[in-house]
Image (cartoon, rainbow, N blue to C red):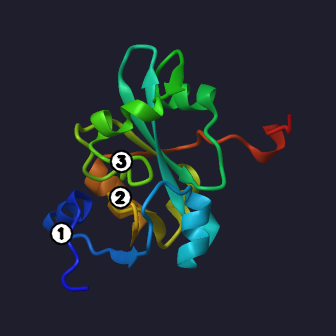
Amino acid sequence: MGKELKTNAMRILDRAGISYGLITYECDEFIDGIHVADQTGVPRELSYKTLLARGKSGAIYCYVLPVEKEIDLKAGARTAGEKSIEMLHVKEIQSVSGYVRGGVSPIGLKKPFPVFVEEDASIEELIYLSGGRRGTTLSLHPEDLVKVTGAKFAHFCRDEESITEN
């Protein structure tokens, strides 16, 4: 297949001297993080997704959370110091982040948005997240993610007991 083309996220990690692992997989269109974890053999609890939200102020925020969890919008707003937040519309993802849906990485976003990482990640040796394009997953130490993005650890996921079936 030849030399793997580096993504912006990989170039940023290289420049920062941060080591990371790389997993590639076949993916031509969007698949969710749970399916990516299953396809790559990465434990779901170590697989993280990147979500973008807009605060009431109009500011954009980046949230990194386990693929099996959901963001609690009220907790996410508190984390960002906003009255409320709403998820970015799918049509806006690429123009705002510079990445396509399913390939959004918190590393190398088009602009330096505030990044929040679910606090559970802080105790893990490695977490897995998008490498900046579909079919690319990076593994790195959570503290290195914080270092390269300026992220903060916070609790903003729904607690399992608060999620109800409709």
Name the residue rendered at 32%, 39% in the picture. Answer: 94
User: Please, what secondary structure does the residue beneath circle 3 have?
Assistant: loop
Q: Is residue 113 left or right of residue 83?
A: left
Front one among 125 and 4: 4
Front one among 38 and 146: 38
Q: Residue furthest front?
A: 28
Name the residue rendered at 54%, 50% in the picture. Answer: 65
Cα–Cα span, label 2 and label 1: 13 Å
Three-letter code for the amino acid on which mark 1 is drawn: Asp
> Which callout, 2 or 1, points to the residue nearer the camera?
1
Name the residue rendered at 42%, 62% in the picture. Answer: 28
Residue 156 x %, y %: 59, 39
Cα–Cα span, label 3 and label 2: 20 Å
Three-letter code for the amino acid on which mark 3 is drawn: Val
Which quadrant of the structure image shows residue 76?
top right
Question: N-terminal of the two: label 3 or label 2?
Answer: 3
Q: Which residue in the structure is indicated by mark 1?
A: 14
Q: Which residue in the structure is indicated by mark 3?
A: 100
Question: N-terminal of the two: label 2 or label 1?
Answer: 1
Residue 116 x %, y %: 44, 43
Q: Which residue in the structure is indicated by mark 2?
A: 145
Q: Residues within 10 Å of mark 3 (few under 14, many from 20)?
A: many
Three-letter code for the amino acid on which mark 2 is drawn: Leu
> Which callout, 3 or 2, points to the residue nearer the camera?
3
Cα–Cα span, label 1 and label 3: 22 Å
Q: Is residue 74 left or right of residue 63?
A: right
User: Please, what secondary structure does the residue beneath circle 2 have?
Assistant: helix
Q: Residues within 10 Å of mark 1 (few under 14, many from 20)?
A: few
